[in-house]
Image (tube, rainbow, N blue to C red):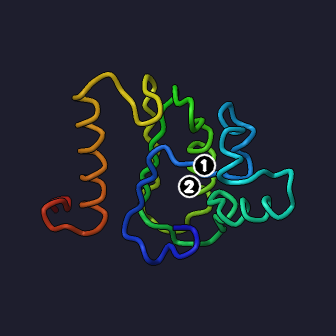
Amino acid sequence: MTERPDLFGAVIINVGIINMVRAETGFNGANNTKEFGTVKNKEEFDALLEMDSYHHIQKGVKYPSTLIITGMNDARVPPWHSGKFFAKLQGFNTSTNPILLKVKFKDGHLTTNSKQKKLDNNADIITFALQHTGHPDYQPEN
């Protein structure tokens, strides 16, 4: 979405690893270095920077409607990934599209103890996508 925001009507980031350059400093980050690389190696750092969505947000760009979801008890992807991305995207965005952050205070990485919470979260995601991609049944009435 940061490379070609014009291609998207809506974006949903559900507990995403968004800030790859800083990811290994998180409490589970070292476990990801075998898969993604480390900032301690120049070539791997360059690759991490290339895939780092946070560092590709630019001022003056019209970004699509975006829903970012994080869990405060996520042991795999710390919630600061979503928080930093949300703040920067909201600050630099020049469109009128909403940039929303949904924080699940008692949940972890795609986990919850409640089936109803899972259903509610999926309903939020689907409704957001349908509304912001123009589905006629999900548009506000005048």
Badge 1 density bin: few <14, some 14–19, many ≥20, Cα 10 Å: few
Q: How many marks?
A: 2
Q: In which quarter of the image is residue 110?
A: top left
Disc 2 element: helix
Give the residue number, with chain letter if any, for mark 1: 87
Give the residue number, with chain letter if any, for mark 2: 90
* Percent coordinates x, y for residue 69 in the rendering: 44, 43
Amino acid of disc 1: Ala
Name the foreground residue: 26 vs 37.
Answer: 37
Disc 1 element: helix
Q: Which mark is residue 31?
A: none
Q: In which quarter of the image is residue 64?
A: bottom left
Is the residue 131 above or below the residue 116 in the image? Answer: below
* Residue under the point 66% across and 59% down: 52
Amino acid of disc 2: Gln
* Residue under the point 69% across and 35% down: 26
Name the foreground residue: 136 vs 124.
Answer: 124
Disc 1 vs disc 2: Cβ atoms closer than 8 Å?
A: yes
**Residues under labels 1 and 2: Cα distance?**
5 Å
Q: In which quarter of the image is residue 65?
A: bottom left
* Side (left or right) of 36 relative to 97: right
Is the residue 125 above or below the residue 136 in the image? Answer: above
